[in-house]
Amino acid sequence: LIDQVAANDKPAARRPPQGNRVTERLNLIGAAVVGAVNTLGEFLAFLGQTMVVLFQTVVERRPLRWNAVIHQMEVVGANALGIVGLLSFLVGIVLAQQGAVQLRQFGAEVFVVNLIGRSVIRELGILLTAIMVAGRSGSAFAAQIGSMKLNEEIDAMGSIGMSSIEVLVLPRVIAMVIMLLLLSFFGAIMAIIGGGLFCWISLAIPPTSFVQRIQDVTPISDLVIGMVKAPVFGFIIAVTGCFQGMQVSGNAESVGERTTQAVVQSIFLVIVLDAFFAVFFTALGYV
């Protein structure tokens, strides 16, 4: 009996100490804030490096990899024409339909044209195009560069004296800036066509009258503001996607995480910048 008791004698399991839930939550919040600050610092450093390389390329007339730029322009712009055009066309129809429903209560359905012209050219056309491109091309940049980082291709570039920013980042940034400008204009035109089609079918507004009223109610400043915002959005989307790709480390799971972060952060920054531009241009008197 004594032998059996000795064989089965085990110390009682200790209950782990109960931590203070408030302290644990504060620790989590603090860790998240520190991580966000570190990420912001790394992003600003990467942004600065990219701008320095871009400045040196322009001022010192360094040779630019035009083959890579043209390839990225095809991937970012030409291959996205279908999805951008279709979604912008549908958004124009929805905007016209919802505007007509609300304005019908006041007998002011004709002002749907004003709503479409000003909102699409100045805000929605550019913003929606930037969001679509961020989800499509921003994620692709992060995944491509992340895979190269995982396969140590970027380290190999550095070992032979090639700058990863000059070879990988700069062509993508230039292509994105140029093509988002063109895609935004194309998306705005498709949204106006969609809204005009709805007005023609449902509100009996002929296309000629629709186009004439668009020209009358939409000042040229709206088009200029929209075209000023588009390259800035493109620059931020490209830099964010490339930055997240450069942060990949460890395993393939990191590629997926960084790709997701690239999309989320790009869309967030685009919306923040759009809000800033709206306040800025309104303060200047462009309303």
Image (cartoon, rainbow, N blue to C red):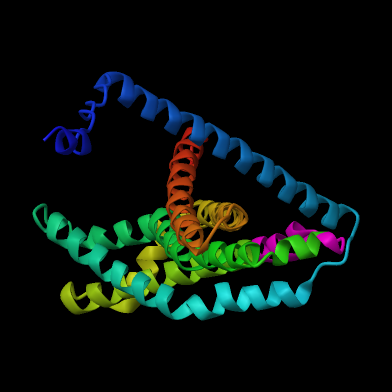
Above or below: residue 279 compared with residue 74: above
Q: Position of residue 89 (x, y in %)?
A: 34, 74
> Does the magenta-highlighted stretch encompass residue 164?
yes
Q: Position of residue 69 (x, y in %)?
A: 71, 72
Helix, strand or loop for the magenta stretch, by majority:
helix
Residue 79 in magenta stretch: no
Residue 105 is drawn in which quadrant? Answer: bottom left
Looking at the picture, tell me which residue is in the foreground, 8 or 227: 8
The N terminus lies in which quarter of the figure? top left
Residue at the far right in the pictured view = 60
Q: Residue at x 52, y 80 (%)?
A: 79
Which residue is rendered at x = 71% and y = 43% of the image? 48
- Residue 61 placed where, x, y %? 89, 60
Answer above or below: position of 11 versus 106.
above
Q: Which residues are magenta?
A: 159-174
Q: Position of residue 181 (x, y in %)?
A: 57, 64
Of the pair 273 and 40, the residue shown nearer to us: 40
Q: Quadrant of residue 175?
A: bottom right
Is residue 244 toward the left or the right of residue 57 in the image?
Answer: left
Q: Quadrant of the C terminus?
A: top left
Left or right relative to 179: residue 66 = right
The answer to which of 74 and 87 lies nearer the viewer is 74
Q: Residue furthest left?
A: 105
